[in-house]
Amino acid sequence: MDSTALTRWPGSTLRAAAAFFVLLLASTTLSAAPATRLVVSDCPKCSFVPPICPTFRSCLEAFAVARSPFPLTIAAMDAAGLPDTGYGGTVVFSSSDSTAILPPPFSFAPEDAGVAVVNGFVLTQAGTQTITATDAGDPAVSGTLRVSVAPDVTSIPTTSGAASVAMAGALAMLGLWLSWRRSPGN
């Protein structure tokens, strides 16, 4: 378009440009539908209430002791990082620990509002393991938590009772120290 057309019809040119811009914006925002993702965390259920959602690393890694049951929070999150309160899928669990004991599939109910605590996870192998939650109807909706698993104390071999006595003494000292810290004035 030459400069004379801009001077003759400046209003219509600006309206056409504005209409094109609005059309461009509308086509970009309507084409990308936000997807739900699952977050597996050892943070409490209340951590998923905005604005405390688990965007910090401490909620995305967990620690456990081998052969000890623990709960996990499963949250369906929308693209904005908020709980997907309308999520009603069924979640199945898997783990890198081949001998792990995992809870049965969990179905979200309306009262869960996209966030639920699921009990009964037991990892048996020490080291770094993963637990994955996957939507049974849509495998693209999933989330994985990395868990550092410490060995079960009873599985550590000892050559004598001396190690047990030393451990009992250390635990007793820790108990005394914790009692002292909780007493008034300290």
Image: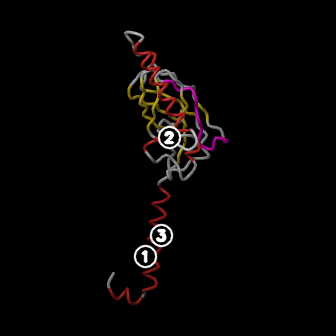
Q: Residues within 10 Å of mark 2 (few under 14, many from 20)?
A: many
Residue 121 circle label:
none
Instruction: Between label 1 and label 2, give the one nearer the viewer.
Output: 2
Question: Which of these two is toward me, 54 or 107?
Answer: 54
What residue is at 44 percent from the left and 71 percent from the top?
20
Judge the density around disc 1: few (<14), some (14-19), many (≥20) Cα neighbours within 10 Å: few
Q: Which mark is residue 17?
A: 1
Bounds of the magenta segment: 110-122
Q: Amino acid at mark 3?
A: Val
Residue holding disc 2: 39
Are discs 2 and 3 less than 8 Å apart at CB? no
Q: Measured from the top left, where is residue 47 in percent x and y?
A: 55, 45
Label 3 crowd (10 A; few <14 / some 14-19 / many >=20): few
Q: Is residue 151 left or right of residue 182?
A: left
**Tag nearer the camera, 2 or 3:** 2
Q: Determine which quarter of the picture holds residue 126.
A: top left
Farthest residue, direction front: 185
**Callout 3: SS:** helix
Question: Residue 95, percent across and down?
Answer: 45, 27
Q: Which mark is residue 22?
A: 3
Identity of the residue drawn at 58% across and 37% down: 89
Tell me the residue at 49%/46% (across/down). 54
Q: Are marks 1 and 2 in contact (CB under 8 Å)?
A: no
Q: Earlier in the sequence, mark 1 or mark 3?
A: 1
Instruction: Give the residue type that dot 1 points to.
Output: Ala
Left or right of residue 81: residue 148: left
- Can you say whether 45 is above or below 80 in the image? above
The x, y position of residue 58, in whole percent, is 45, 42
- In space, the residues marked 1 and 3 are separated at their CA atoms by 9 Å
